[in-house]
């Protein structure tokens, strides 16, 4: 009896399934999908992080540098101890020390230029004497500027001045001159640099006048 019941139950289920398949084909797909979902298995794998060899080498170098730097810091000796008072004493000494100045090799020489008048005892005209002193002073100033050495001597000169003040002829009286070539050139240049001279005053109504002068070069 029980065997008959089980046979009937199995037959009933078969009929129901075939009926569903014929009546609704989508139900078969649903059943097949369910069966496929049960058969699919998903497996997860744990991946290990991959590090490049260059990154590992750089990290090793950084670690080595840190160790070497720390070792150097440890090996450096401490700075010497200096007292505060000693530092300020040294600064005061250096600031108050006198600088050593070089001794000058050139000794300054005082120049003396004199223009001695010649044959003035016979002249009594004060206007002529004043004019003569004016041109002598101009020549003396130029001679002082042109005289740059320590040669000594005196040069006797004769020169002509035209009424408008321009310089005419100039010559050296060699017989009365006691000087070297340098002083002679200085004397001639000084007279030329001093010209032109002032115009003759009205009282000196001459086309030209001749003057004699001695330029003396001395040093102290």
Image: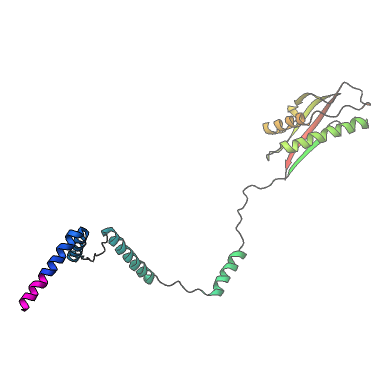
- Quarter of the figure with residue 207: top right
Locate residue 44, reporting x and y percent. Answer: 22, 66
The magenta stretch spans residue 67: no
Q: Which residues are magenta?
A: 1-10
Q: How is the image coloured?
A: rainbow
**Which quadrant would the N terminus be assigned to in this image?**
bottom left
Q: Main secondary structure of the magenta part?
A: helix
Q: Nearer the viewer, residue 183 or 137?
A: 137
Locate residue 27, reporting x and y percent. Answer: 21, 61
The mark total stands at 0
Left or right for 175, reference 131: left
Q: Nearer the viewer, residue 96 or 206?
A: 96
Q: Please report the residue visible at 73 percent of the width from the left and 29 percent of the height from the top.
A: 188
Residue 180 in sight in this render? no
The magenta stretch spans residue 4: yes
- Quarter of the figure with residue 129: top right
Left or right for 212, reference 5: right
Q: Nearer the viewer, residue 214 or 142?
A: 142
96 shown above or below 197 = below
66 shown above or below 216 = below
Locate residue 111, reporting x and y percent. Answer: 73, 42
């Amino acid at each position: 009896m029980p065997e008959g019941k089980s046979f009937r139950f199995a037959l009933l289920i078969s009929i129901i399934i075939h009926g569903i398949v014929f009546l609704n084909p989508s139900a078969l797909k649903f059943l097949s999908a369910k069966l496929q979902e049960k058969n699919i298995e998903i497996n997860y794998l744990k991946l290990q992080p991959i590090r490049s060899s260059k990154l590992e080498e750089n990290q090793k170098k950084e670690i080595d540098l840190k160790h070497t730097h720390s070792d150097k810091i440890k090996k450096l000796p401490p700075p010497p101890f200096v007292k505060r008072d000693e530092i300020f004493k040294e600064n005061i000494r250096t600031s108050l020390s006198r600088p050593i100045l070089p001794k000058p090799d050139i000794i300054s020489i005082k120049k003396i230029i004199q223009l001695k008048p010649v044959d003035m005892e016979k002249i009594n005209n004060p206007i002529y004497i004043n004019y003569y002193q004016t041109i002598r002073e101009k020549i003396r100033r130029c001679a002082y500027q042109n005289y740059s050495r320590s040669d000594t001597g005196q040069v006797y000169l004769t020169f002509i001045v035209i009424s408008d003040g321009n310089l005419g002829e100039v010559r050296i009286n060699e017989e009365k001159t006691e000087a070297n070539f340098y002083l002679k050139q200085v004397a001639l240049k000084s007279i030329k640099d001093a010209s032109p001279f002032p115009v003759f005053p009205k009282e000196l109504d001459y086309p030209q006048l001749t003057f004699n002068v001695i330029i003396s070069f001395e040093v102290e």
